[in-house]
Image (cartoon, rainbow, N blue to C red):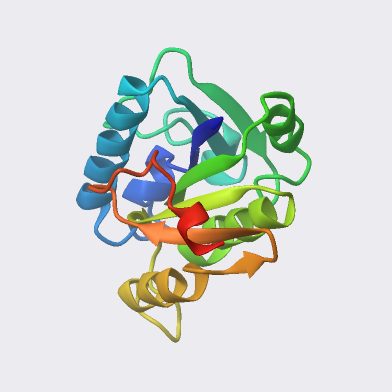
């Protein structure tokens, strides 16, 4: 089965925060888990794709780049986006289709925005998704804490389906590149 690791908005300024925005919840665990899953992907020769948000750090400089503590594989691909949805206005979906990708492991920021939209859009477009439950993060909103937002999305998106294709939530320590979707079809 063709699959990729998709890491969304794991950018330095977004993870560490700035004068205007606080750091994401549990950022050290997030970085550790992203690196763990990248290591697993590398061992299995699974490609890693990064999506960067052009709104972060005004689209330039160190703040815009993938966080410097994340071990970016040399052969990684990068797509830059101007919208919340990683598939909108980028070459991501055509790339996935050209590579015959059927399974996407998703990690990154922010849970209720870019992660949620990527999971839902991927399933609509014929992909099975594994969302890494301890591999995405966000900041507090005015009504919910970051931890509540993450827990809510892990519960909501586990089993979220569009008939043939759906998402599952598993943790970084699990064998993410052995998808379990077929056990539930």
- Identified at 32% across, 40% down, the residue is 34
State the image coordinates of residue 160 (x, y, percent, origin top left).
57, 69
Relative to 12, does residue 134 appear above or below in the rendering?
Answer: below
State the image coordinates of residue 129 (x, y, percent, origin top left).
53, 51
Can residue 68 be seen by looking at this rendering? no
Q: Quadrant of residue 144?
A: bottom left
Relative to 55, does residue 96 appear above or below in the rendering?
Answer: above
State the image coordinates of residue 46 (x, y, percent, origin top left).
44, 25
Name, please, the residue furthest toward the top.
Answer: 74
Name, please, the residue furthest toward the bottom.
Answer: 143
Q: Is residue 138 left or right of residue 123?
A: left
Relative to 99, does residue 110 appear above or below in the rendering?
Answer: below
Can residue 90 be seen by looking at this rendering? yes
Relative to 139, does residue 19 appear above or below in the rendering?
Answer: above
State the image coordinates of residue 100 (x, y, percent, origin top left).
68, 29
Q: Is residue 30 left or right of residue 84?
A: left
- 24, 119: nearer the viewer: 119
- Identified at 38% across, 73% down, the residue is 140
Q: Is residue 128 left or right of residue 106?
A: right
Q: Is residue 36 left or right of residue 181?
A: left
- Identified at 70% across, 65% down, the residue is 163
Classify the position of the C terminus by image quarter. Answer: bottom right
């Amino acid at each position: 089965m063709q699959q990729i690791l998709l890491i969304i908005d794991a950018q330095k300024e977004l993870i560490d925060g700035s004068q205007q925005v606080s750091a994401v919840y549990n950022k050290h665990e997030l970085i550790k888990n992203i690196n763990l899953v990248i290591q697993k992907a590398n061992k299995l020769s699974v490609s890693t794709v990064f999506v960067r948000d052009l709104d972060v750090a005004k689209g330039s400089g160190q703040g815009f780049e993938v966080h410097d503590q994340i071990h970016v594989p040399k052969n990684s691909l990068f797509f830059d986006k101007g919208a919340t949805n990683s598939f909108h206005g980028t070459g991501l979906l055509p790339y996935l289709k050209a590579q015959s990708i059927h399974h996407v492991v998703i990690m990154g920021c922010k849970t209720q925005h870019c992660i949620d939209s990527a999971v839902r859009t991927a399933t609509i477009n014929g992909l099975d998704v594994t969302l890494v439950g301890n591999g995405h993060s966000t900041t507090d909103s005015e009504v919910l804490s970051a931890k509540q937002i993450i827990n809510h999305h892990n519960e909501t998106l586990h089993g979220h389906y569009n008939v043939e294709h759906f998402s599952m939530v598993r943790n970084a320590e699990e064998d993410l590149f052995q998808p379990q979707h077929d056990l539930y079809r």
